[in-house]
Amino acid sequence: MRINGIPGDEEFGDGNSGNGDPSDPGDPDDNPPDNEGPDDPHDNPDGSEHGIQNNLADAIAALARNVQCQGDGPRSKVREPDPFDGTDPAKLWTFLVQLRLSFNDRPHAFADDRNKVNFAILYLKGIALPHFKNSLIEPDLLNLPAWDDDYGEFVLELKTYFESLDVVGEAESKLENLSMKPTQHITKYLVEFNRLATITGWDNHALRHQFYCGLPARIKDEVSRVGKPITLPAL
């Protein structure tokens, strides 16, 4: 309908559909696009549940890997073994103890005896290293050494060639000749004295006498001034 040449509402419209009926869906192009796409969880509830389950499974797997990695890591800070050169039999026992601490700290890394042997050889030097190195560089394939993949045999080999047959006698001799240097700190003297004393098994009276004999003159003078204690701990 036209009134005075002015187009009617049917030509311009009022923002609604052309017929003014709010129930008319109108042109489908006027509706906003569905941004949620075919993966809309409302359209596919089963797919949503499946995705949540997958995410949960991934999270559990990641946690399990993290826990496993933590379990394989070092549990404490253990110092590396002091190299053993074979010239001092008294140091062999300390060397073996330090190796054992390293093995206990990383049980997964040293689950195999061959790994233990190879690790121990890394810390050999002097006359001790060639004894094992020659067998590694030029192995006799028809007669491989028993210690090659057996840590117990490796320790036995070390003890056979580098352990003193008279550990106590050597400790007694070293203790009798041990003395504190005038410029030395007494702590170093105490550590070495106690190490040797443990091996000798001497009684308190003998140890007290030997400890006093090894002190420098300046400390002996001070001890004489206050009176010599009757026990080693008091001294």
Image (cartoon, helix red, strand yellow):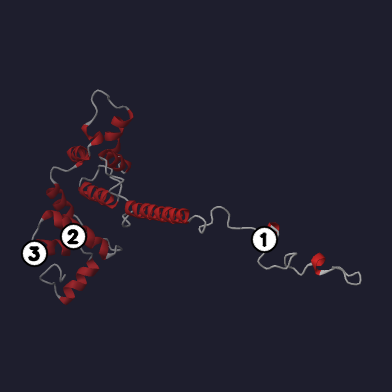
Q: Is residue 18 above or below residue 93?
A: below
Of the numbered discs in the image, which one, if any, rests on residue 194?
2
Give the quarter of the image for residue 157.
top left
Q: Residue furthest bottom?
A: 226
Tell me the element at label 2: helix
Q: Which residue is mark 3?
A: 205
The amino acid pointed to by label 1 is Asn
Q: Position of residue 22 (x, y in %)?
A: 68, 68
Residue occupying the far top of the picture: 142
CA separation in Å, label 2 and label 1: 93 Å
Q: Earlier in the sequence, mark 3 or mark 1?
A: 1
Quarter occupied by residue 30: bottom right
Foreground tag (2 vs 3): 2
Which label sits in the foreground, 2 or 1?
Answer: 1
Dot 2 or dot 3, earlier in sequence: 2
Q: Where's residue 152, x and y in %?
A: 19, 40
Choose between 27 and 74: the one closer to the eye.
27
The residue singled out by tag 1 in the image is 31
Q: Is residue 187 above or below residue 164?
A: below
